[in-house]
Amino acid sequence: MAVFGLQMIFSLVAFTFLQKLSRYYSFGRWMLSTGLVRYLHPTNDELKVAAGIPLGPSTGTRVKHRRDHRRNNPEKIQTESFTIPRSIPLTLETAKVEACDLLPLHYFGEFQWLMDFSLCALFVYVSTEIYYGLLSRTEPNISILWCLLVLGFCFRILMMQTYVYFQTEDGGERILCITFGFFFLVAAMGVLVVSENSLEFGLEQGYNNFSDNAIEFLKQQGITSHGPMSLLTFKIILAFLCAFLGAFVTFPGLRLGKMHADALNYTQGQPLRQFLLYVSFTYPIIILLLWVKPMARDIICGLNWRTPAQILSQPAFETARFVVICIFFLLRLGLVKTYLQSHLNLAYERIETVRKESGRIGNLELQKKVACVFYYLCFVAVQYFAPIILILFLTFMLKTLGDYSWENIIGGGYLTRRSQLPASKPNVSPTADTIAQVTWAIANIRSIFSAMWYRGLLSFLNWWIIAAWFTTSVFGTIYYTKTSIG
């Protein structure tokens, strides 16, 4: 407690919330149980009435009971089988989504845990940043551990969902995922050969700094080395990592494109809401351009001879990137109900599509078309939130490990780059405490991974995830727009 101070208190409060209060106050559960309306699948009796099929003698007394049972058990469908004309006039009943409706849904536990843990991690990070800004800056920052856990949960959920798509045999999802993986591999190789004068990640400078620090550390241990690996080998490994990341965000991006196209259709006549949808969808372009040096830093910081006026200083420009990403997160968070409601409205669209077809359809098949939309609500919500949470907490790690400061946006200077300062071995006697030796060793290891290294690597990974997610969302919007038109 003496080492971490108030940071430990922040973590304990957040942990207590997760352990004790999340079952009563869940941000993830509240997010889905307020403001959303779902469509109830028609019962067998309703289908028979619409199709003109005679009902049983005791059916009428059980209609209300079956409707209540249907509402409380959206995934359970009656097993009686019969066929009805596809063109029958059918009106779906609606109901507000309540917390009790979410319990049997697919991926509800994963979604609730991701949202609640991310909220606690955000609380710990913001509290730690305020603590560092107002009081001491010499303690280890344990909020990084929370950020790492959030990133781990996001990657785990994205991998689980990708594995679900890989299990399908006839849907084509496996081929689509592999195709986008190879596409992003080629794209990553192209991005990695671009000059630092155009895309200013600082990746080469950061890796060279890491390699030099590693060689120096090994020399201090009496080991002769030429460095961990060549820069070319590092970029090849990074390109394959980018291919996997691109494959993980492929289906979340395609899903976002589908929801965006549907949301624009359902918000016709609401110019403000449509404007926000367009801004939210195209906002990643602004973020991506902030790392294009001739179009961002040179113009905003007045480094271009044609635009000598300086809008922001270079330290303020670095921090402005983080602010822009945080605004992006808030914008997507504010529009989540619109996007998720567009998914729930697919049930109505499916019924309208069926009515335009000829022939007959089984009652079970028709009911499943409606029920599955709500059943996969949490699956869709995870696809919507996981990438943006991943981007947000990668930004937090970049800010902290890269030794940036929020004060730069208002004219403050850089923080002292403690991680770049070489560690000095303490002057201790042979009989000194072993803890001092361990502390010295840890300090030397930390000196290998400098702020310059974190800036280059995390900037590139964050930029790449945004680029891959936006690319797949554009593909999804174009595809589903052309499909709906056709």
Image (spheres, rainbow, N blue to C red):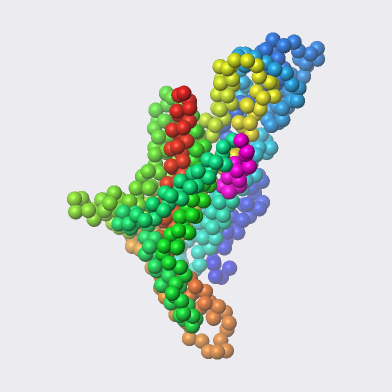
Pick whichever, 259 or 218, lies toward us.
218
Which residue is found at the position 43% from the left and 49% from the top?
Answer: 186
Which residue appears at 67% of the width and 21% of the height?
A: 42
Is residue 311 visible in the rendered image? The answer is no
Q: Position of residue 478 (x, y in %)?
A: 44, 33
Q: Is residue 169 magenta?
A: yes
Give the percent coordinates (x, y) of residue 216: 43, 77
**78 relative to 86, above or below:** below
- Observer-nearest of 107 and 468: 468
Relative height, residue 443 to residue 426 (above, below): above
Residue positioned 28% across, 51% down in the render: 294
Name the magenta segment's main secondary structure.
Answer: helix
The residue positioned farthest toward the right in the image shown: 58
Residue visible at 50% across and 33% down? 259
In the image, 81 versus 112, the foreground residue is 81
- Residue 286 percent across, percent down from the top left: 36, 45
Residue 324 visible in image: yes
Q: Is residue 160 magenta?
A: yes
Q: Which residues are magenta?
A: 157-170
Horizontal side of residue 422 vs 378, given as left or right: left
Numbered disc total = 0
* Left-right relation of 219 to 49: left
Quarter of the image with the N terminus is: bottom right
Q: x, y percentage for residue 461?
A: 45, 54
